[in-house]
């Protein structure tokens, strides 16, 4: 399976080549990949249904305990199935939707890469592997939202989605690290069995916050919900696939996966159920204000994601069953509805539901599919959506914390969603026909096949929800703490409170639909309030980031080399000094054994260096440098380094001649700095010099390690056939260094030659004319 | 000798950094020279300073008799001296050219690409 997923990335990369071979049929060919993966998964079903947990081991970085092990249990199987099946349908669909589009190969590359990333995400057993795939889905999502890269709004939405999800990803990485430390394992299979340990651990609260931040941003929970509707700038197949059926569910998947490990505490229950309920209500409330069919669906996706989070927060056995049913129902109807929205856009040329009407006459099949899917969205019998909604209401009634508030929010969301479903399914297809930008006609089979199949599944599972029992049981076993619960889904539960709530929401929803235009006009008055929502916060944050970046660039990258030097040196002194004094037992333990002439040589060096700094004449400064250089040569003579002494003497002589010749024509030193600046520089210089002295003393008083040069001393004559060991090292033991040195010298020589050849007169002649013109202007 | 050298090297480094913080480009070059000399001395002295025992193998023997000065730092410093000279000659010519074109010795007047 790992090979299949990694190979899938290769197939993704080959899309342009495949497109060269198969032309417009490429999407169909590529759909074989997810289809065959789905077939393989189907083959694993008996084992998964029996409650087995398949672990496919694969070492990746064994030293760091990072594996590419895949974990297949009910939860992973359900998600993987959704990804592969809807993936195949979306590929077929996009073949028609983007027929003839010149960027079709690019689209196929990215969407296939996304598919594989998502598959890796839900199958990964290792936290690091999961994180890598998690970020890959964010990146591929960025590329897909910005698919129409010539459109400014698309680019902006893509960047916004990326910032929000990757920002959350950063928090998630920290959360995972803490999770691994607290649970002493990187493996999800092991961590889920250590819930007791994790919940008692001191790191529990910070790691929960970080993990929730990651999951909430990815799954567009309040207050991060704003990026998802903006992501609708993507082509419709992308919206159907990434931004309703799969990627945005990654956060929910993670929460479900970690439910046994982290769930059940007060923090978990209250945060998830409140945030989820709030997201539900916000999504549904914002949906109703839009007339763009994709925005309507996007906000209702936000609502559904909120519902899923809330159900995980409630966390009772019933809520988990509701979670699975709702998840499946949502993926089926929302995928179908998005594809229908794409058909409308493609065939009628508009996304505005108020601009369409009576389309059922020209596109009856699309209307039928839309009707079935919308019934499921509305949560009406006999569809799977109804089963999901009933279970959801039943779970809310079981909620342990804040029950009335959650119930109110969930109920509001439910009736507004019903209105949204009515708007999407009725507005475009019924009523008087309207002029649309394109003359509408029925969609091609390739585009209808996907939504029709999904709608059919919604209907089948709605009529016979018992078919889903084994799947729900296997999945809940992966999420819940106790396995093997008796699960039975049914369409009809008798007259009970959830049913009454459904009826009430039906009435209110229809009422809202009837007065939608008036409702919208009324809500438009809230616009100024909306402008201060979380998205405004995001904009302010981004603007603030830019301001801070500009400020610190002006401060730090100000073009003054000495400022860079001062900052670098002070950091060096601070860090090394700290380590030297606080981390190192620092003893000054040495005997000063110096002959008089040696002290004189050292004194000459110091005098030469200081004189070179304070001399006001250039020639005197060069002479002082010479004094220092020759004293260094003397030091080499005195301390057994004849080769160094010869080289230093030669180089020093050449240096002095060069400086005198070249610098002779330069102006005299002028006083350019203020006394304060000089004092500051002196302080920095002395600090650094002092640190070097201390470091060297620390090194000298420390223990000597065995020297590599002993080998060179012993083998210089036998192996190198030379009596001067330094020479043998240069031309033999470390000959490559010498070769590099020769290259440096050659480059310097070429540079010097080029600069001397390039006469200033020639430069002036070429640049004088334009500069004079500029002066005149 | 090493403790005395440690102080000497510290002074050399301080002088080098002070000169590199000047606005005059010629002083910057002087600072660079001081810095390379200081670094060479640091490597040489840290390896231990030995009087009168150059790393030479006497004729007819395969290894020196008794301890000799560490040859490896000497080889490294030798390379460094030559490279420092290469860099210096390049820098000096560069300064000269810059002055011919910009007619300024002040680094603050060379911040922009417009001349």
Image (cartoon, grey):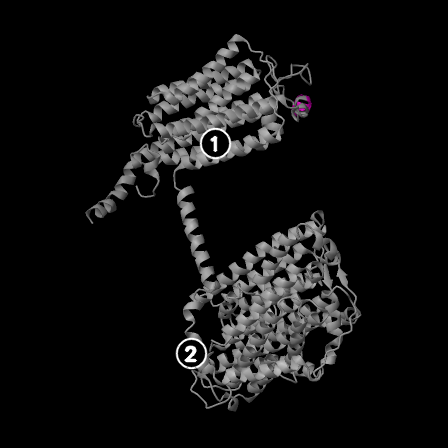
Residue A151's label in the rendered image is none
| Residue A100 in view (yes/no) | no
Above or below, A753 against B47 in this view is below
Chain letter of disc 2 in the image: A
Residue B71 placement (x, y as % from top left): 61, 22
Magenta residues span A714-720
Image position of A42 (left or right of A774): right
Residue B8 appears in the rendering: yes
Mark 2 Cα shell of 10 Å, populated few (<14), some (14-19), many (≥20): few
Relative image position of residue A123 (x, y in whole percent): 69, 63
Looking at the image, which is closer to me, A180 or A454?
A180
Query: Does the magenta-highlighted stretch encompass residue A149?
Result: no
Q: Is residue A667 above or below residue A350?
A: above
Disc 1 target residue: A745
Query: Main structural element of the magenta stretch: helix, strand or loop?
Result: helix
Which secondary structure lies at badge 2?
helix
Name the residue furthest left. Answer: A776
Instruction: Give x and y (percent) for residue A670.
Output: 30, 27
For the residues carrying marks 2 and 1, which lies nearer the camera in this image?
Answer: 2
Element at label 1: helix
Say which mark, if any, is on residue A521.
Answer: 2
Q: Which image quadrant is residue A555 in? A: top left
Quarter of the image with the N terminus of chain A is bottom right
Q: Which one is in front, A420 or A511?
A: A511
Say which label, 2 or 1, has the lower sequence index. 2
Residue A79 falls in image quadrant? bottom right
**Residue at 68% from the left image edge and 68% from the top image edge:** A80
Q: From the viewer's side, name the closer residue of A82 and A626.
A: A82
Q: Give the letter of the chain under mark 1.
A: A
- The answer to whether marks 2 and 1 mark residues whose Cβ atoms lie closer than 8 Å is no
Q: In this view, does A185 lie above or below B41?
A: below
Asked whether A716 falls inside the magenta stretch, the response is yes
């Amino acid at each position: 399976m790992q090979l299949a997923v990694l190979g899938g990335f290769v197939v993704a990369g080959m899309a342009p080549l495949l497109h060269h071979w198969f032309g417009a049929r490429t999407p169909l060919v590529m759909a074989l990949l997810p289809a065959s993966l789905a077939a393989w998964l189907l083959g694993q079903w008996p084992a998964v249904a029996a409650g087995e947990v398949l672990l496919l081991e694969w070492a990746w970085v064994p030293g760091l305990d990072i594996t590419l092990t895949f974990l297949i249990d009910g939860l992973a199987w359900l998600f993987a199935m959704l990804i592969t099946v809807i993936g195949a349908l979306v590929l077929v669909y996009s073949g028609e939707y983007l027929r003839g589009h010149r960027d079709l190969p690019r689209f196929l590359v990215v969407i296939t890469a996304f598919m594989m990333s998502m598959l890796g995400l839900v199958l990964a057993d290792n936290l690091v592997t999961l994180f890598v795939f998690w970020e890959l889905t964010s990146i591929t999502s960025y590329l897909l939202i910005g698919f129409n890269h010539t459109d400014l709004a698309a680019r902006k939405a893509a960047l916004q989605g990326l910032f929000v999800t990757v920002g959350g990803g950063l928090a998630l990485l920290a959360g995972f690290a803490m999770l691994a430390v607290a649970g002493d394992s990187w493996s999800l299979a092991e961590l889920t069995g250590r819930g007791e340990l994790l919940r008692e651990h001191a790191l529990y609260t910070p790691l929960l916050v970080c993990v929730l931040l990651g999951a909430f941003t990815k799954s567009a929970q309040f207050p991060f919900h704003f990026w998802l509707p903006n992501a609708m700038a993507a082509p419709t197949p992308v919206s159907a696939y990434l931004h309703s059926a799969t990627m945005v569910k990654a956060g929910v998947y993670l929460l479900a996966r970690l439910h046994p490990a982290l769930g059940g505490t007060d923090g978990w229950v209250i945060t998830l159920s409140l945030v989820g309920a709030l997201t539900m209500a916000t999504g549904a409330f914002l949906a109703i204000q839009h007339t763009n069919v994709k925005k309507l669906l996007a906000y209702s996706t936000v609502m559904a994601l909120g519902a899923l989070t809330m159900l995980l927060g409630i966390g009772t056995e019933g809520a988990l069953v509701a979670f699975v049913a709702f998840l499946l129902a949502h993926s089926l109807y929302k995928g179908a509805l998005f594809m229908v929205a794409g058909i409308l856009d493609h065939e009628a040329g508009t996304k505005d539901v108020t601009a369409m009407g009576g389309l059922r006459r020209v596109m009856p099949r699309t209307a039928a599919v839309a009707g079935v899917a919308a019934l499921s969205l509305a949560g009406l019998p006999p569809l799977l959506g109804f089963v999901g909604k009933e279970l959801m209401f039943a779970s809310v009634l079981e909620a342990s914390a804040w029950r009335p508030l959650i119930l109110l929010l969930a109920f509001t969301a439910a009736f507004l969603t019903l209105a949204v479903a009515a708007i999407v399914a009725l507005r475009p297809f019924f009523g008087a026909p309207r002029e649309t930008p394109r003359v509408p006609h029925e969609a091609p089979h390739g585009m209808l096949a996907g939504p029709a199949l999904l709608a059919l599944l919604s209907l089948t599972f709605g009529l016979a929800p018992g078919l889903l029992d084994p799947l729900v049981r296997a999945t809940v076993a992966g999420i819940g703490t106790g396995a093997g619960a008796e699960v039975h889904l049914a369409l009809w539960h008798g007259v009970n409170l959830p049913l009454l709530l459904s009826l009430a929401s039906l009435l209110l929803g229809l009422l809202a639909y009837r007065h939608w235009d008036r409702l919208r006009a009324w809500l438009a008055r809230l616009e100024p309030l909306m402008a201060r929502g979380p998205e405004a916060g995001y904009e302010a944050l981004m603007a603030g980031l830019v301001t801070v970046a500009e400020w610190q660039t002006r401060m730090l990258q100000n073009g003054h080399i000495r400022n860079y030097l001062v900052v670098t040196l002070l950091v060096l002194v601070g860090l090394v000094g700290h380590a030297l004094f606080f981390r190192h037992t620092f003893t000054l333990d040495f005997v000063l054994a110096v002959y008089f002439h040696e002290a004189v040589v050292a004194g000459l060096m110091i005098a030469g260096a200081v004189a070179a700094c304070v001399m006001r004449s250039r020639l005197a400064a060069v002479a002082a440098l010479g004094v220092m250089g020759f004293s260094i040569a003397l030091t080499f003579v005195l301390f057994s380094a004849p080769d160094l002494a010869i080289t230093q003497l030669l180089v020093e002589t050449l240096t002095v001649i060069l400086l005198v010749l070249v610098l002779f024509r330069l102006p005299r030193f002028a006083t350019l700095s203020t006394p304060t600046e000089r004092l500051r520089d002196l302080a920095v210089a002395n600090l650094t010099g002092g640190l070097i002295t201390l470091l060297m003393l620390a090194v000298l008083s420390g223990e000597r390690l065995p020297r590599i040069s002993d080998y060179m001393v012993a083998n210089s004559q036998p192996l190198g056939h030379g009596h001067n060991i330094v020479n043998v090292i240069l031309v033999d033991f470390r000959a490559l260094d010498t070769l590099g040195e020769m290259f440096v010298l050659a480059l310097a020589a070429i540079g010097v030659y080029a600069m001397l050849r390039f006469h200033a007169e020639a430069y002036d002649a070429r640049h004088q004319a334009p500069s004079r013109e500029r002066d005149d202007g | 000798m090493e403790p005395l050298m440690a102080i000497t090297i510290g002074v050399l480094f301080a002088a080098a950094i002070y000169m590199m913080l000047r606005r005059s480009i010629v002083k910057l070059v002087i600072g660079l020279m001081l810095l390379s000399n200081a670094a060479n001395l640091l490597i040489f002295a840290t390896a231990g300073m030995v009087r009168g025992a150059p790393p030479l193998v006497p004729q007819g023997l395969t290894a020196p008799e008794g301890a000799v000065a560490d040859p490896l730092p000497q080889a490294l410093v030798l390379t460094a001296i030559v490279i420092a000279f290469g860099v210096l000659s390049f820098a000096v010519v560069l300064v000269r050219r810059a002055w011919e074109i910009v007619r300024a010795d002040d680094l603050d007047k060379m911040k922009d690409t417009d001349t």
